[in-house]
């Protein structure tokens, strides 16, 4: 038996839809700032790997790995504070995997774009690969 897809009311977007909208807003913001999109939602193969929301190229050639975080409330430190050390390690793991494909290693940095309260905050060099 085939069941019809349940319709989601406009005011009840799914978590994925909210996350995708935050990524879209972050991407537009970064592109307006002159960055060029290289990859979106880059994932490493296998279990326990990492995922990078946006991989961008800055005008100076820097490869920018971007984690986009969206929060409705700052009750637990807000969006930027939600990038835990474990999440950072997974992003770095995925970045290394991505960079292995390249012939020449560009300069790199890890940014966080926080989307909250109708505003976008771009934290350049938010963490290191150490």
Image (cartoon, helix red, strand yellow):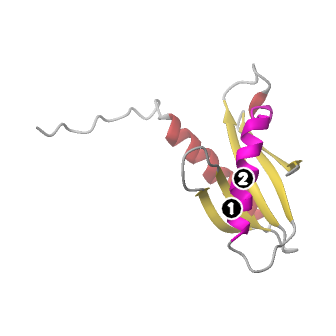
Q: Quadrant of residue 71?
A: top right
Q: Is residue 120 left or right of residue 19?
A: right
* Looking at the image, residue 105 lies above or below residue 90: below
Question: In the structure shown, which secondary structural element does the residue marked by tag 2 occupy?
Answer: helix
Residue 26 visible somewhere in the drawing: yes
Where residue 19 appears, x then y in whole percent? 58, 42
Task: Decide whether residue 24 is among the magenta residues.
Answer: no
Pick whichever, 20 or 47, lies toward us. Answer: 47
Q: Are marks 2 and 1 in contact (CB under 8 Å)?
A: yes
Q: Say which residue appears at 10% left-offset and 37% top-offset.
A: 1
Q: Which mark is residue 123?
A: none
Tell me the CA gap for discs 2 and 1: 6 Å
- The secondary structure that most of the magenta stretch takes on is helix
Q: Residue 75 at what x, y percent from top left?
A: 75, 19
22 to 12, vertically: above or below: below
- Whether residue 119 appears in this view of the structure is no
Q: Residue 82, how many percent across, how many down?
A: 75, 32
Which of the two residues, 112 or 32, is positioned nearer the viewer here?
112
Residue at 80% over, 32% down: 81
Question: Residue most toward the top?
Answer: 75
Q: Residues within 10 Å of mark 2 (few under 14, many from 20)?
A: some
Residue that carries the numbered disc 2 in the rendered image: 93
Q: Residues within 10 Å of mark 1 (few under 14, many from 20)?
A: some
In depth, the one of 126 and 29 nearer the eye is 126
Mark 1, secondary structure of its residue = helix
Residue 97, numbered circle: 1
Q: Which residues are magenta?
A: 80-100
């Amino acid at each position: 038996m085939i069941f019809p897809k349940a319709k989601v009311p406009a005011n009840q977007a799914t978590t994925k839809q909210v996350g995708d909208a935050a990524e879209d807003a972050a991407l537009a913001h970064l592109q307006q700032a002159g960055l060029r999109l290289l990859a979106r939602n880059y994932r490493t193969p296998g279990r326990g790997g990492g995922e990078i929301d946006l991989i961008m190229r800055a005008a100076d050639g820097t490869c920018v790995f971007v984690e986009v975080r969206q929060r409705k409330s700052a009750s637990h430190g807000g969006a930027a504070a939600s990038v835990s050390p474990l999440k950072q390690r997974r992003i770095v793991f995925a970045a290394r995997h991505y960079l292995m494909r390249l012939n020449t290693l560009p300069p790199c940095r890890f940014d966080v774009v926080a989307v909250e309260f109708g505003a976008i905050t771009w934290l350049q060099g938010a963490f290191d690969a150490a």
